[in-house]
């Protein structure tokens, strides 16, 4: 089933790769996987990617999690910090154009989050802004296990390198591909 899904996604990406190029700015078409693998080469560059929106921040709609057919994840934020994303993007295949930014997480940050027992956003590992969810997890005692799991995951990633790159696209355009 997973293989079939990946093949379908790959076919869709290949057939519509130029679909959303309607902007006067030039955008480099790149796969999400290549962007993540070579993030340093694309930092501060305009790119165009296609992927599935698998999550949108429920607090303010200002962050989306875009997934490639192979499972690679990008964070998508609006170029204008006052804007939020259309909830219709959730669970949809989209084309995103925007500027690549990289956030680096180092061991000191992970140590601090562990010491504070901070519940982290699963999109970008910053402190979660959903106060209701955070408070519910604290009251139920589930917060400790969640924090521990997140910290273990980050530490495993840090074993191989000095920092973890989280790639973000500051989007100027997001378009549904089934329009």
Image (tube, helix red, strand yellow):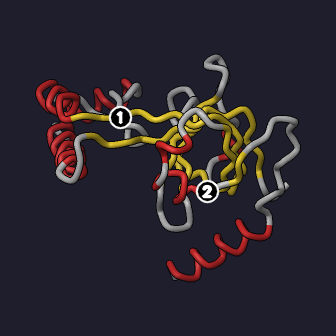
Q: For mark 1, what is the residue?
A: 104
Q: Are marks 2 and 1 in contact (CB under 8 Å)?
A: no
Residue 178 in the figure: left or right of residue 64: right
Residue 167: x %, y % from top left: 48, 41
In the foreground, 31 or 76? 31
Residue 18: x %, y % from top left: 81, 57
Could you give the CA–CA distance between mark 2 and mark 1, rounded to whole angstroms?
24 Å
Q: For mark 2, does the 10 Å Cα neighbourhood hold few (<14), some (14 to 19), or many (20 or more) residues?
A: many
Residue 161 in the figure: left or right of residue 103: left
Q: For mark 2, what is the residue?
A: 52
Q: Is residue 127 positioned above or below 39 on the image?
A: above
Residue 18 in the figure: left or right of residue 141: right
Q: Is residue 8 positioned above or below 37 on the image?
A: below
| Circle on res. 152 | none
Q: Earlier in the sequence, mark 2 or mark 1?
A: 2
Label 2 secondary element: strand
Q: Is residue 94 positioned above or below 146 on the image?
A: below
Q: Nearer the viewer, mark 2 or mark 1?
A: 1
Residue 117: x %, y % from top left: 16, 29
Residue 76: x %, y % from top left: 57, 39
Q: Residue at x 23, y 48 (%)?
A: 161
Q: For mark 1, does the 10 Å Cα neighbourhood hold few (<14), some (14 to 19), or many (20 or more) residues?
A: few
Q: Residue at x 19, y 42 (%)?
A: 151
């Amino acid at each position: 089933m997973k293989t079939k899904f990946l093949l379908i996604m790959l076919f869709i990406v290949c057939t519509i790769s130029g679909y959303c190029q309607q902007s006067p700015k030039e955008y480099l078409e790149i796969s999400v996987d290549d962007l993540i693998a070579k993030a340093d080469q694309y930092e501060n560059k305009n790119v165009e990617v296609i992927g599935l929106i698998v999550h949108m921040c429920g607090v303010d709609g200002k962050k989306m999690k875009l997934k490639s057919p192979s499972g690679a994840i990008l964070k998508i934020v609006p170029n204008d910090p006052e804007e939020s994303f259309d909830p219709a993007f959730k669970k949809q295949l989209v084309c995103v154009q925007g500027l690549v930014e990289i956030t680096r997480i180092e061991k000191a940050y992970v140590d601090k989050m562990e010491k504070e027992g901070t519940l982290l956003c699963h999109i970008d590992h910053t402190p979660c802004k959903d106060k209701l969810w955070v408070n519910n997890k604290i009251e139920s005692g589930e917060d400790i296990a969640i924090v521990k799991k997140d910290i273990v995951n980050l530490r495993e990633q840090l074993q191989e390198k000095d920092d973890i790159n989280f790639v973000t696209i500051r989007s100027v355009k997001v378009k549904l591909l089934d329009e």
